[in-house]
Amino acid sequence: MKVALAQIEIAAGQPATNAEKILRYVEQAKDQSADVVIFPAMAVSGMFIGDTLQQESFVSDCKFFNEKIIASSKKITIIFGNFDGEILVARKGKLVQSKNYFRNLNFRVEIASTPFRIGLEKIHDKKLSEEARSSNCPIVYVNAVGIQNRGKVIYTFDGNSTVYNSRGEIVHGIEPYEENLSVIDLDEVNNFPALELADNEEIDEIYSALFYGVEKFLEQLKISKVVIGISGGIDSAVAAALYTRILGAENVYLVNMPSVFNSATTKSLSEQLAKNLGCNYAVVPIQESVDYTVNQLKDTSFSRIGRTSHINISNFVKENIQARDRSGRILAAIAAAVGGVFTCNANKAETTVGYATLYGDEAGFLCALADLWKFQIYALANYLNDVIYESEVIPQGIIDIVPSAELSTAQNVDEGKGDPLKYPYHDYLFRAFVEDLKTPEDILNWYKAGTLEDEIGCERGLVEKYFPTQKDFTADLERWWKLFTGMAVAKRIQSPPILAVSRRAYGEFNESQNVPYFTQAYIENKS
């Protein structure tokens, strides 16, 4: 029996487009003498389509195209996923009951529309391998490629369609992120040698997902030019290298926007990055416009019931003015002028606690890196240099310099001063908050037991290094928990879409703008 695996790109909410493609692949499978052709789940409707499924007219359209696909099964059996998650099996031009159909087969079919997640492929392979071995039955797994979104979250679908023999070995597969029709003789599957699977590092998977997801998103929106604010820091440098690889250097505009607080070091690194990548580059100083805004506000008087008052422009407010001037004024204007968009370069640690300025560096058309922790950003920088470009396009100085927003003298990088986040520790603390749903109660229990670093996965010795006393430790813990569950939620609600790569990306789980809460057990343990 010849079985065709149809790993196709599904356009969410576009049943006409999807059905046309399915019918085309059906004919290709017939031309290759396949007895069965298998498509992914939700193949006609798409996976993430929100309340579109509540529209009766849309559902009727899906059913109409289902019938066209079923009618094309006169000389082949077609297996595909319905809009409601059901598996449809058609043969001889009619729909048959899937459970009766599968009962008479000597192999099992599993179809999916499963987005990429770091490490998910290995878990999934292990599960299907065990099931094939325990049932002594080959398994054919077909997944979709492409991107789909839930508004605030962009998902990549990597495919990785595979065939397992009855010993649980992978004997056939389709390359990830590629549309393809692959035919295999299932009667011979147990005679095939097991494939030697590539032992990909996590960073390989991350880069592939980011490249594919961003490229597809740009294609969908018909965006060909991107503007990136580069600061001489690691996040914007990685964003610049990634977008340059996708769009070409001629379509990427890098803009350095120094104030009096930006060092000669970071300005020089920004220029070197642009030269290495070959992108369009400009320096647009902001101090004059920032000073103008500050002075204008200082001179502004408010009147009420015959009385006048003035507002105080604190140093903190001045920092925010700088960030908003860069994004809301300069980057947005340049993007409009060149017919493109500007990016948000935030990482997941910053997004977790809202370490970004609303309407400033929180703005942009897409947060491509906002599901990556800082340590993953550094790994990606080295990967881009060593593997993708095979040269030091991201200067080593950017990788080595202390992370800093350079918004005040307190963040002078030449003096080793930087962000308040201690990334080697806070990355892992925040990951425990976000991905493992841990609370200050859990963190404090581990701290008291002396197991915190092992539990969250950071390097040993960091807690004592950063927090000499218990008071220092709890003050830090409470500071970031209050932000994570407080103001940062409001910022995330208004942030651009995020490209998901982890098992728990912002935008895909429910959040409420509640007052930060500490459990009674935490309060008692702290005291």
Image (cartoon, rainbow, N blue to C red):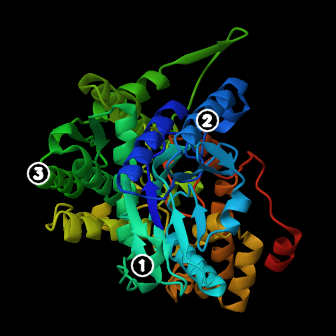
Q: Left or right of 127: which side holds 99?
A: right
Location of residue 342 (image quadrant): top left
**Mark 3, residue position:** 275
Task: For residue 93, say whether it is visible.
Answer: yes
Secondary element under disc 2, as helix, strand or loop, is helix
Q: Distance between the residues labelled 2 and 1?
A: 34 Å
Q: How far apart are marks 3 and 2 (CA)?
A: 56 Å
Q: Going 32% across and 33% down the picture, which residue do you hit?
A: 223
Callout 2 crowding tier (Cα within 10 Å): few <14, some 14–19, many ≥20: some
Location of residue 139 (image quadrant): bottom right
Residue 172 at x, y = what percent?
A: 40, 73
- Identify whether 473 is placed above or below 503: below
- Identify whether 53 is placed above or below 397: above
Q: Going 35% across and 64% down the picture, which residue do you hit?
A: 175
**Mark 2, residue position:** 67
Of the residues under marks 3 and 2, which one precedes in the sequence? 2
The C terminus - image quarter = bottom right
Q: Nearer the viewer, mark 3 or mark 2?
A: 2
Residue 521 at x, y = what percent?
A: 86, 74
**Mark 1, residue position:** 171
Of the residues under marks 3 and 1, which one precedes in the sequence? 1
